[in-house]
Amino acid sequence: MKKILTINIETKSRELNSRMMIAYEALKRDYIVIIGAQDEITKLIPYLPDSIFFEKSISKNKLKKLTKIKRFGHKIVNLDEEGMASQNNKHFYLKQRLSKNTLDLIEYFFTWGDNEKKLIEDNYQEYKYKVKTTGNPRIDAWKPDYIEFYKDEIYQINQKYKNYIFIASNFASLQHARGNEFIIKQGKDYQKIETKEDEEIINLKQIFFNKVYIAFLDMIKYLSKSLPNETIVIRPHPGDNFQIWKENFKEYDNIHIEYKFSATPWIIASECMIHSSCTTGIEGFFTKRPVFSYLPYNDHEFINYIANSLSDICNTKHELLDKIQDVFSEKYKVNSNFSSKILEAKPILENADFIGSAKKILEYIDNIEISKHKKINKLRFFLAKIGDIIKTNIKKLMGQKQIIDNYYIQKMPGIKKNEIYTILNQLKIVDNQLEAKEFEVQEVFKDVFLIKSF
């Protein structure tokens, strides 16, 4: 008899590897794992056997969904993929990312670090017993120990680009793939803007972001012209409008816009990377690349971010150019104060100094009492497929269409069975378990997989 762990994934490039690390740890403990695209898993909720449901957020706008998950017999745990917002965006983190009603519905809230844990406990003291510091497996996946994850992607990148400067975007709120109207609607749907204080905070942040964005574009053009023989690769944020990036730099031959793969292999294969208050700066730090945070303005709390603290901060494009030239002339020293920065990061990133976040998470999940199943009833998945086809056709007849645009595809381009097998085998290599359990992977719904160990 086995417990079942259900894991959904919203943004493939951001979450697949780390969620598979949790799945792998569960499989080692003889769980059955159901993992897949968030939208498809949501359709399956009524048809899934009772499981421990691993959520990526318990935002207050998700109350209806979380209530449904609970109603169908699942126990919910949560690790907020936007949990880093607890550091430099506390107002909206507390307002939007959780609520008393959603905390009521879960078993555990896993945090990136003690700082996030303390913030929740200080504001929701009655739920202290649910809040557990585990770290996020994403941090582990960025460390050299897990380079096996990225070797094929690094090889493909090196076949196309060599000795390049990597630049990560963090400006989806200004040029979103679905446009400004989507951002406004999303803010209303998420009950983000309800008071004058909310509106003022949003406006000040947008003004700041716009200033930084203009300076960021100018900096890239300056580097392109100053380093005409060097290659610059820009990877847009998953929410960005790619066409805007392409349009901005269409006249610059040494600038290339790429979105294939997650940011990590691009960082590892680069000579150095540049960001501005972006989580990719944390990736760069742990992959031990030269990482520069470009901060032309310092007049907003948003820059008080661990990604900046772990980077070499440059306030001017001239300072940045000098340091990049040092990188290419091999004069630049990477992470000379690595140990002290790890200590600084520890309260924010629990697993900054160790590998094993997924194990800590499973130690808590093991304590959850839930029905166990000898085998999965595949008929239920078949009924889910039939039900989805019927609903889709009814919506078509009523003139309703599912939105599958560039934004949706950028976030979830689809998951293939061979990708799941590849990641599991990579994890076995990292874990020195090549002779251990084998895995059976079945696609039971579009972009949803059932995994068993034997």
Image (spheres, rainbow, N blue to C red):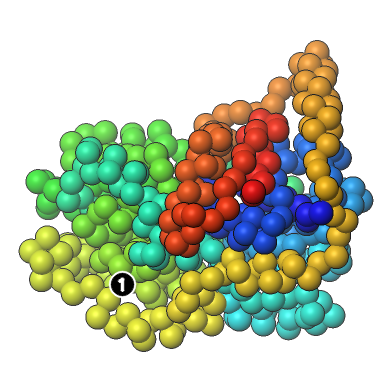
Q: Residue at x 72, y 71 (%)?
A: 364
Residue on which disc 1 sits: 313
Residue type of the residue flagged with mark 1: Ile
Decide: few, some or many residues near mark 1? Use Cα within 10 Å; few <14, some 14-19, many ≥20.
some
Q: Nearer the viewer, residue 281 or 34?
A: 34
The image position of residue 354, as x and y in percent, is: 47, 76
The quarter holding residue 412 reads top right
Whole-percent x, y for residue 61 in the image:
77, 53
Q: Residue at x 65, y 68 (%)?
A: 361
The image shows a total of numbered marks equal to 1
Which residue lies at the image location 57% right of the left edge and 69% below the top edge? 357
Using the image as rendered, state which of residue 125 and residue 372 is in the foreground: 372
Identify whether 34 is placed above or below 74.
above
Q: Quadrant of the N terminus?
A: bottom right
Camera-side residue of 415 and 443: 443
Residue 276 seen in the current view: no
Q: Where is residue 330 shown, x and y percent of the image?
A: 10, 66
* Quarter-of-image position of residue 285: bottom left
